[in-house]
Amino acid sequence: MNEDADNALTKWQSVKAAISVFVQDDGPEGIGVGIQYFGLPTPAVPGCTAFPCPNDGDCTAGCTTCSSGVCHAPFNPDEDTCEAMEYAWAEVPIQQLPGVASSIISSLSMHGRGTNTPTLPALQGAVDYAEAWQIARPDHVTVVAFATDGDLRH
């Protein structure tokens, strides 16, 4: 969200408020919710692509960090990635409400607006993550909710 600063801030605040109200409401109890953000910085180590891991010791090929069960490299903060596989994980993995609400709220508080909008790879990564989650839980219905500033750059 790199448009006019006031407009972008207002959009980000609206998204944060809407998500916060939803996860803290009594109505969606039992619904699984996770969250991921975009754009993500480009990995600083070429050849490292995100892949599942139980801990840092399982990360290889320059992928040195296991976060939310995914190995990835340290990031280059000056450039957003346009690789769908870099978005195919969740900062807060899908878990049931109300238990995951505090993790979602905490995660939202650590993020702000200010990146580019790699819409297509971010959406593809989110869909890939949701499909993998769905395959592992065929008795669940899985939906991706995608909030963006509307800029289709990638």
Image (cartoon, rainbow, N blue to C red):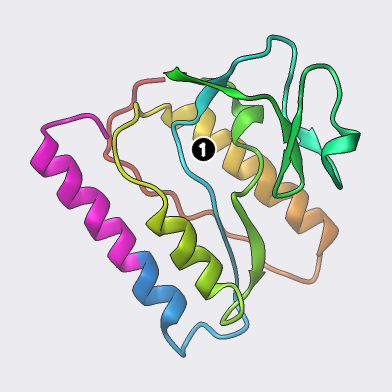
Rendered position, 123 above or below 94: above
Q: Nearer the viewer, residue 113 or 97?
A: 113
Q: Is residue 7 left or right of residue 147?
A: left
Q: Residue 105, located in which quarter of the rendered image?
A: bottom left
Q: Quadrant of the C terminus?
A: top left
Q: Position of residue 126 (x, y in %)?
A: 58, 43
| 97 over 12 or under it: above or below | below
* Residue type, label 1: Leu
Q: Residue at x 66, y 43 (%)?
A: 89
Measured as percent of width and height from the top left, residue 59 is found at 84, 30
Q: Is 69 colored magenta in this rendering?
A: no
Quadrant position of the N terminus in the picture? top left
Element under disc 1: helix
User: Range of the magenta residues?
Assistant: 1-18
Q: Which residue is mark 1?
A: 123
At horizontal 49% and vertical 30% (from top left) the residue drawn is: 40
Q: In the shown orientation, is residue 46 left or right of residue 56?
A: left
Q: Nearer the viewer, residue 47 or 30?
A: 47
Name the dominant secondary structure of the magenta segment.
helix
Q: Is residue 137 left or right of residue 143?
A: right
